[in-house]
Image (cartoon, rainbow, N blue to C red):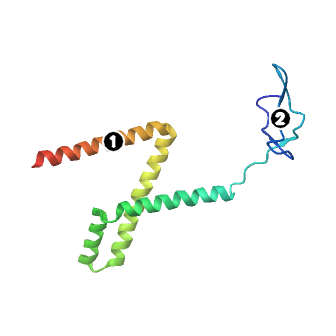
Amino acid sequence: MKLDSVPLEISGISHTEIKLELKDSNDINLAPAIASSVQPVIADSPQKQQSVLVVFGTTFVTIFLAEIGDKTQLSTLLMSAQSHSPWVVFIGSAAALITTSLLGVLLGSWIANRLSPKTVEKSAGVMLLVISLMLFWDVFTSH
């Protein structure tokens, strides 16, 4: 059997019924197993849809909670009150948030294609640490 051949799945036999018998150091007896070609995974599988929903839900909740009470929301509130055109302010602020989110996603995709996930995690951690230290420094030196 070639190692680079089509992957095989064991069908008709439970995993507990399969026993590999070593004849000698180089030969494995797979006689009890019936091998057949693996069917490709369908993109619309329930597990795939669930993971998309989980990612969407996690992203929504995280961004929603992070944006409550921040300067963007307060600016939007003040502009809406001042202009007396809340729907125009809503459309403008929504377009701005969508644009910044698009830039974040595109930049994130570009970085993900060029760096390993561990490197991205470590870099993000270092950047957040540096920003935190700069904020602490500013607080301590301004008093």
| Badge 1 amino acid | Met
Secondary structure type for disc 2 = loop
Residue designated by label 2: 19
How many C-alpha atoms fall within 10 Å of the one at disc 2: few (<14), some, or many (≥20)? Answer: few
Residue 90 picture location, percent across and down: 36, 73
| Image position of 21 with respect to 24: above or below | below
How many C-alpha atoms fall within 10 Å of the one at disc 1: few (<14), some, or many (≥20)? Answer: few
Of residue 129 and residue 5, the one placed in the foreground of this image is 129
Name the N-terminal-most of marks 2 and 1: 2
Residue at figure coordinates x 83%, y 35% from the top left: 19
Name, please, the residue furthest toward the right: 31
Question: Where is residue 74, by image quadrant?
Answer: bottom left
Q: Judge from the rendering whether residue 79 lies leftward or rightward of residue 113; answer left or right.
A: left
Q: Judge from the rendering whether residue 12 lies leftward or rightward of residue 119; answer left or right.
A: right
Secondary structure type for disc 1 = helix
| Badge 2 amino acid | Lys
Q: Are marks 2 and 1 in contact (CB under 8 Å)?
A: no
Question: Where is residue 130, by image quadrant?
Answer: top left
Residue 84 picture location, percent across and down: 27, 80
Residue 5 picture location, percent across and down: 79, 33
| Image position of 51 with respect to 81: above or below | above
Residue at figure coordinates x 42%, y 59% from the top left: 62
Of residue 84 and residue 141, the one placed in the foreground of this image is 141
Residue designated by label 1: 127
Q: How many marks?
A: 2
Q: CA distance from mark 2 to mark 1?
A: 52 Å
